[in-house]
Amino acid sequence: MASVSKKTVLNAPLDQVWSVVGDFNGLPRFVSAVAQSTVEGSGAGALRTLTLQDGGKIVERLESFDEGQTTLQYSIVSSPLPVDNYLSTMKLASLDDGRCELEWSSTFDPKGVPQAEAEGIIGGIYEMGFEGLNKLYPS
């Protein structure tokens, strides 16, 4: 099983960033590859369909959502990405100076590509999300 874990510090308070990151339908606000998101259902078990800029679609399931711990977990149901058994966690933590840290991590099985390539693709998506969040909350 492969894994990717990345962290970034954001120049905004946790509550402000959680309002974006914790919105299961909000990925288009900070991941530029996502053109549109729709959600069916609410809470654990909700499904979101992400339409990518190139027209591809990814369906993800919200596995858990913990407002108090500012953590959510989701899995991929179907996707053109070269991964199977994908489970991701996004967790925010407050820092002393009014900023916060986001850790975005996942485990998965590479599908049809070497592990390093699959890890690079997933890591690239997280970096794209960090870039988008840093544009929302510039230093």
Image (cartoon, grey):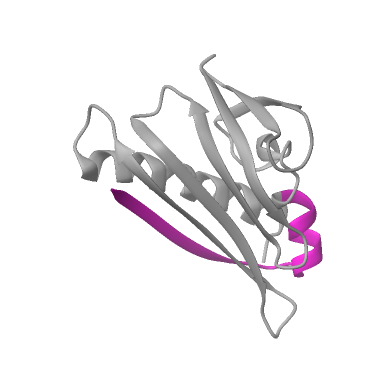
Q: Is residue 114 left or right of residue 43?
A: left
For the residue pair 128 and 112, the one nearer the viewer reads as 112
Q: Quadrant of the C terminus?
A: bottom right
Q: Is residue 135 left or right of residue 14?
A: left
Is 14 magenta? The answer is yes
Query: Height in image: 51 above or below 115?
Result: above
Query: Height in image: 11 above or below 63?
Result: below
Task: Look at the image and give the residue range highlighted in magenta.
Answer: 1-20
Where's residue 90, x and y in %? Answer: 58, 55
For the residue pair 81 and 60, the one nearer the viewer reads as 60
Where's residue 111, x and y in %? Answer: 28, 30
Q: Residue at x 63, y 56 (%)?
A: 134
Where's residue 50, x and y in %? Answer: 61, 26
Residue 44 falls in which quadrant of the image?
top right
Residue 16 falls in which quadrant of the image?
bottom right
Of all residues shown, which one is farthest toward the left? 114
Q: Residue at x 58, y 43 (%)?
A: 74
For the residue pair 7 and 59, the one nearer the viewer reads as 59
Of all residues shown, which one is farthest toward the bottom? 96
